[in-house]
Amino acid sequence: MARIQGSERLKKRVRAALTAPHLAAFLPAVMIFAYWYGGEHLMVFVAILFPGLLAVGGALTRPSPRTGAVKDPTTGLPFRPKLIAQLDHGFESNAEYEKSCLILEIDDFQKLSAHLGAAGMHQVLATLSDRVRAALRETDLVCFLDTGRFGISIDKRQRADLEATLQLAARLQAAVSEPISIDQTRVLLSSCIGFALPSRAPEATGEALFAAAESALDVALLGGPGSVRAFSNGMATRVGRCEHNRVDLSRALDTGEMLPWFQPQVCVKTGRITGCEALVRWQHPTMGLIAPGAFLPAIAKAGLMERLGQVVLFGALSALRDWDLQGAKIPTVAINISADELNDPSLSEKIKWELDRFDVQPERLIIEILENVIAQTEDDVARHNIHALAKMGCKIDLDDFGTGNASIASIARFDVHRIKIDRSFVTHIDTDSDQQNMISAILTMTRQLAVGTVAEGVETHGEFTKLVELGCQYAQGYSIAKPMPAHAFADWARAHEPKNIQPNTFPKLA
Ligand code: C2E
Ligand code: CA
Ligand code: CA
């Protein structure tokens, strides 16, 4: 460390000498001397060489940003070495308190960066660092790690056990989830947290405690957005950000490890189940249940999106047939169609063939297409597919509405059945008047277009009630039920049959 600092100091001095403005004043004198000593040729040579030497010298002695910077300029937070030193100190005999380590990662950070750009991200990170700091004690330490991660060391005072750390994690997540205003846009974020208590560290070092918190975060990320995990001894080795390879993914698709789970959609007025959405899950042999956010990018990279689509369609239609046979009344099932699938010229034919095979009426199959995919659909193949599916009788739902930029013309052109209002507009709708105004505007527009509305990500009773009041038609979210396997869904649906539900009542919580 001392050697690095010494060499940085030397570089700084040489650079200052080479780039000082008065050095340029010597140039004419040097040229005259060269002309007098060696004639025209030497003068030209020196005229090129002298400024060149200054430029090269200046560049070579430029300070290296990593070793120079002590704090991140955006957040004003220190980096990882400071965190490790603080965690190390917690294991020393003279330390007042032991330290626990938490790592918080903003969900969908890459997508967010692409959406907001550098200036927007600057504002997001600066706001979040203030909030995270405000949620902690003065003596706790927050560091900026890398893309969208904050590392935290907290004093393990009395009763700072598992329960208390879980509560702190929930407070940090709540602080992150408060809306952030950027120009005219409101950004709503969620985060995952992994943490490790000192008593669980594999070794009594800051590095080991930090690595344990990273392992816990890796497991949290597999659980999907908003997950929290504590490091346990069973997690001894770091899972790592899994780069699932094509062979594993193909095997999982072929052997039934990847299957759709189902989340109900209900009519907000009557509470009746109007259908469900098929959402893929990977029951991994060693890692347990994995949410799609953790493996869909790998599926796309491996070119397996179409194969996934087949697996989910097959699973969804088999489930619908089984539920019919069991007498469970599930009117529709919705599947998510990716842009890759939509560009397959035989997509509508394949879907028709499967519907015939399972003897399911096309009206019972809902095709969910992302708003930003439909907005960019100038492509003939995708357009043909959407029109062919609609003509066949399938319904088209516009997914994640409000996050893309589909025009009113494209909603009309594609004969959209319903729009699914993205969770970011639904969160806090019962308490936040800006959110209410936004949803009211969307509902006015959909009424004029004679398009239905489904609110996504309805997490609380309060949000559900507000949606009823504002006139939204359908709802889907954890407050009604989380996604579940096909067999569990049939049981859940039976427990919610219409005889149990009075009009205008909130469906029983799962
Ligand atoms: P999506 O289509 O917007 O699906 C809704 C996501 O929100 C699901 O996440 C669901 O579990 C989650 N969710 C539902 N209710 C709530 C709630 O009240 N609160 C919160 N915080 N979340 C809620 P999931 O299952 O992790 O899926 C994530 C995304 O992965 C989906 O977003 C969809 O874009 C994609 N996906 C899932 N299955 C498939 C599939 O079979 N094919 C394709 N192409 N994409 C899929
Ligand atoms: Ca969807
Ligand atoms: Ca959605």
Image (cartoon, rainbow, N blue to C red):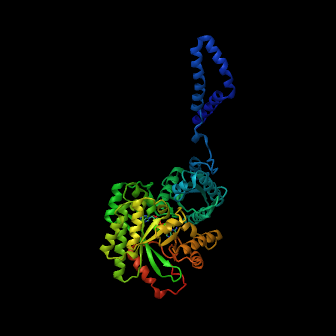
Q: Where is residue 192 in the image (x, y as percent from the top left)?
A: 53, 61
Q: Is residue 255 left or right of residue 91?
A: left
Q: Quadrant of residue 424?
A: bottom right
- Can see residue 510? no
Q: x and y percent of residue 219 in the render?
A: 46, 60
Q: In this view, does 275 lie above or below 115?
A: below
Q: Can residue 412 be seen in this view?
A: yes
Splitting the image into 4 quarters, where does residue 504 fall? bottom right
Residue 97, image x, y percentages: 61, 56
Q: Residue 75 versus residue 110: which sits nearer the camera?
A: 110
Q: Residue furthest left?
A: 357
Looking at this view, is 181 or 259 the one in front? Answer: 181
**Left or right: 275, with 25 as reference point:** left
Quarter of the image containing the N terminus? top right
Q: Nearer the viewer, residue 42 or 233?
A: 42
In x, y percent, where is residue 300?
40, 57
Q: In this view, does 312 lie to the left or right of 419?
A: left
Residue at 63% over, 27% down: 18
Q: How many numbered callouts? A: 0
